[in-house]
Amino acid sequence: MVGIALLAWSCSDGSKKLPYLGQKSVETKVENGKSITDSVYHTIPDFSFINQDSVVFTQKDVEGKIYVADFFFTTCPTICPKMKTQMLRVFEKYKDNPHFMILSHTIDPRHDTPSVLKEFGQNLGLDSKKWQMVTGDKMKIYELGQKSYMVTATDDPTQPGGIVHSGAFILVDKDRHIRGIYDGTVPEKVDNLIKDIEVLLAEQYPQK
C-alpha cells in the first residue's frame, strides 16, 4: 500500500509538524503474535561524492543533522545566482547551529571540479564544513536528484548554460526524510523555508 504523506499536527502539545514528502509505504508485520503496522517514509538513499576539499562525502557526513539540499552549477547564468543569494540567507541564519548544514550538488561535474567548487565557495565567503558542495558522476547526480530529491535537471544546448534545472531547496530531516520543498529563487518562499527549519529543529532537537 503506497500513498503520499500529508501534513501532520501533534495532538499532545498543538505544535506544528512538517509533512513527510514523497511516497509512503505501509508495512504490516507480526511480532509476538500481534500484527503491527508501520509507516515507511521516503528516504534519501546512501550516496558518495567528492566535496570541494577533494574528500569523499557520504550520507554518514549528514548523519544526525538536518540539511537543505540543492542542485546547481557554477557557470549557470540564469537561476543559480538567485539561488545562491537566497541560500546565503539560510547559511547566515544557521551557520552556528551544530545540527544544521547545507549540501549543494553540481549538475555540471565536468567543469565543476573540487578546485572550482572550492574557489566558488571561497568567493561566497563560506565555511566548507557547514556548506558542502559536491561533485561526482553526472548520471548518479541526476538520478539522485530525480528519484530521491524529486527535482529535475536536463541537458539542453539551446538554453543559457546548456542545462535546464530546478531551483528547489529541499529540507531533509536527520533521518533523511524530505520535509519540505521550496522555490530557492523567491525570497518569500525562502522565508517559509527558514520558518520550517525552526519547526524541524524544535521537533528533532527539543530543548530539555
Image: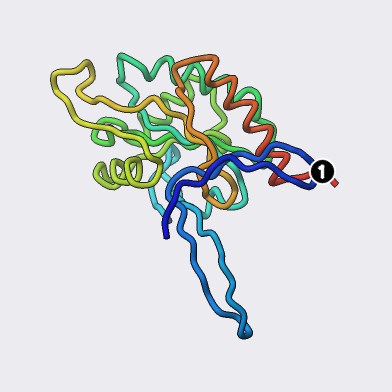
Outermost residue to the bottom: 33
Q: Quadrant of residue 145?
A: top left
Q: Where the N terminus falls, by quadrant?
A: bottom left
Q: In this rendering, does residue 132 appear at all?
A: no
Q: Quadrant of residue 195?
A: top right
Please tell me how many numbered marks the rendered image carries: 1
Name the residue at 38% across, 46% down. 148
Type of amino acid at the residue the image marks with label 1: Gln
Residue 78 vertical position relative to residue 193 in the rendered view, above or below: above
Name the residue at 59% across, 48% down. 174
Secondary structure of the residue carrying numbered label 1 = loop
Q: In this rendering, does residue 105 appear at all?
A: yes
Question: At which x and y percent is residue 150?
Answer: 38, 39
Question: At which x and y percent is residue 119?
Answer: 42, 25
Q: Which residue occupies the foreground of this view, 33 or 111?
A: 33
Question: At which x and y percent is residue 11?
Answer: 75, 46
Q: Which residue occupies the foreground of this view, 82 or 57?
A: 82
What residue did someone put label 1 on? 207
